[in-house]
Amino acid sequence: MKQIALPLAKGDNHGPESIVVGSANQAAVDALSQPESWPYGTAILAGPPRSGKSLLARWFAVNGGDVVDDADRLEEDALFHRWNRAQQDGVPLLLIASGTNWEIALPDLRSRLGAALHLEIGVPDDEMVGALIDAHAVHRSLSLNDDARAYLTPRAERSFAAIEALVAAIDRISLERKVPATMSVWRDALEAVQGRAQPNLL
């Protein structure tokens, strides 16, 4: 498991941000590292909420690419103009889509984006879930030991947003109770976020 640092980006008063690279996004990261291989120099990146699409876009932009965030919400004529400009300037263009069901009405734009490289961030595996828990904890200056990762990983929902919410809940409950983040805090945070009592997993 590795991380990509974003030295120019600052988080929510917690210091520099970074991108956890693992099973869910490794293929996308590899493709973003090689824009010269993209058809027509264009790629479309989709993925679930809080999966790091905007962070990857920022990293790509820092390395010289052109980025359109929420491209599927932009007026199609404006997006077509942006695509043409990228072609003229010879700059790789990354379009960030909020979902995979992007229906394009403008025929010229539909044909061009249909030929683009389509990338999607998937579901994190156990190793990546653990790394995400660690990364969010570090981002919040929250102390979680190896036992916390071992306890939380098999119980956490396989969702980027849910993992982020889980660590936030651990931090909040720990601060409210003025106690370290121990198993009782982990368990209550899991129940608060996932809405059910947690099973006893061996």
Image (tube, rainbow, N blue to C red):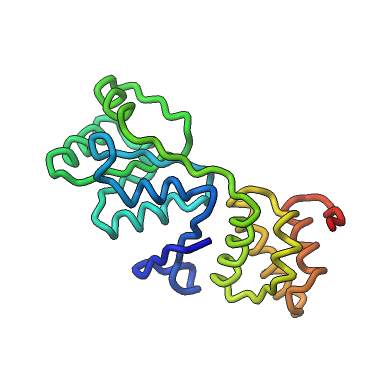
Q: Is residue 140 left or right of residue 37?
A: right
Q: Nearer the viewer, residue 123 or 22?
A: 22
Indicate the quadrant containing the C terminus: top left, top right, bottom left or bottom right.
Answer: bottom right
Closer to us: 40 or 83? 40
- Which residue is located at x 29 percent, y 55 percent? 61
Question: 70 left or right of 159?
Answer: left
Quadrant of the image occupied by residue 77: top left
The correct choice, above or below, for 123 with respect to 171 in the image is: above
**Considering only vertical position in the picture, is 41 above or below 141?**
above
What is the x, y in percent for residue 73?
38, 36
Measured as percent of width and height from the top left, residue 19 is found at 46, 60
Q: Nearer the viewer, residue 56 or 24?
A: 24
Say whether residue 196 is left or right of residue 166.
right
Q: Is residue 182 above or below residue 83?
A: below
Point 49% across, 44% down: residue? 121
Instruction: Work out whether 59 lies above or below 24.
Output: below
Residue at x 13%, y 44% (from the top left corner): 89
Query: Camera-side residue: 198 or 151?
Result: 151
Outermost residue on the left side: it is 88
The image position of residue 98, as x and y in percent, is: 46, 40
Q: Where does residue 146 sit, x and y in percent of width and height?
A: 70, 71
What is the total number of numbered labels drawn onto the structure image? 0
Corner quadrant of residue 105: top left
